[in-house]
Amino acid sequence: MTTTLTEAACRVLLAADPAEKCRLTRDFAEDWRAGRISELGATRPPDRPARPERPQLLPFKEMPRRSYGGDRGRVSLIHALAHIELNAIDLGWDIVARFVGQDLPREFHDDWVRVAVDEARHFEMLEDLLASLGARYGDLPAHDGLWQAAEKTADDLMARLAVVPMTLEARGLDTTPATMDKLSRNGDTLTPPVLDVIYNDEIHHVAAGVRWFSFLAERRGEDGEAAFHATMAKHYPAGLKAPFNHQARAMAGYPRDWYEKLAR
């Protein structure tokens, strides 16, 4: 029986089968909400989560270019997004377990457990879209960039928040509306509604990143903007890619000066 939240997190991280990973995520999140799991514990997460035998992982530069036209293009795009969401489930649980010793309030853990549940739902929605096209997750190669970002921020919670929700997920807010528009113009009526659900959920994920980055900066007696810029200078020295979706970022409580000054 799983008795602590970090033990639950590690069981999800060590589940190689995506369906099992999603099922455990929902079950443990409900146990945490209901108080059946009440202690954080101190179980250390693995360096890397378990993964199924497929998809094959390639260097980012070797990945085929995405297409938006026809069923083949849709499968390529949806598969890439499903791979991101599977990694995102693990990132939600990893942040719970990896940084457990930092005297964080319960609300911090509530937020990232909720994020993991959202990501599991997103993965399953995308898997259903793949099935409707006669495909499945693992049919195409994928890259390991998202987990590499996790590895590079494994020793610094503020860096993890700045890089994952505040940069990588925020970039999704910038690009998803254009993706939905392209798909709709190509006659796709099924994928854009799923991407719209993901888009709106990820506003809340970015908001959680901003909220807890600001919390940690204030606790350290640092200015939030200055701390963010110092962190980004280390991890994104070339700056951030524009244009930005200012409306969605504002809904996430993301101060415009924080990111816009870093535009390249």
Image: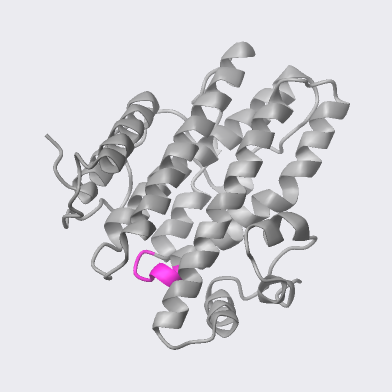
Judge whether residue 125 is colored magenta: no
Going by the picture, which residue comes out furthest to the bottom?
221
The quarter of the picture where the C terminus appears is bottom right
- In the image, 149 versus 112, the foreground residue is 112
Q: Position of residue 236 (x, y in %)?
A: 60, 71
- In the image, 139 versus 128, the foreground residue is 128
- In the image, 12 versus 196, the foreground residue is 196
Q: Is residue 149 above or below residue 7?
A: below
What residue sits 38% from the left and 30% below the top? 22
Q: Position of residue 262 (x, y in %)?
A: 70, 75
- Residue 223 visible? The answer is yes
Going by the picture, which residue comes out furthest to the right?
185
Q: Position of residue 133 (x, y in %)?
A: 64, 13
Q: Is residue 175 left or right of residue 201?
A: right
- In the image, 89 versus 68, the foreground residue is 89
What residue sits 28% from the left and 37% below the top? 28
Q: Is residue 151 above or below residue 77?
A: below
The quarter of the picture where the N terminus appears is top left
- Residue 245 visible? The answer is no
Q: Position of residue 255 (x, y in %)?
A: 67, 71
What residue sits 22% from the left and 42% below the top? 35
Q: Quadrant of residue 75?
A: top right
The total of numbered circles placed on residues is 0
Going by the picture, which residue comes out furthest to the front?
34
Magenta residue span: 154-159
What residue sits 26% from the left and 51% below the top? 46
The type of colouring in the image is: one colour
Q: Is residue 1 left or right of residue 130?
A: left
Q: Quadrant of residue 3?
A: top left
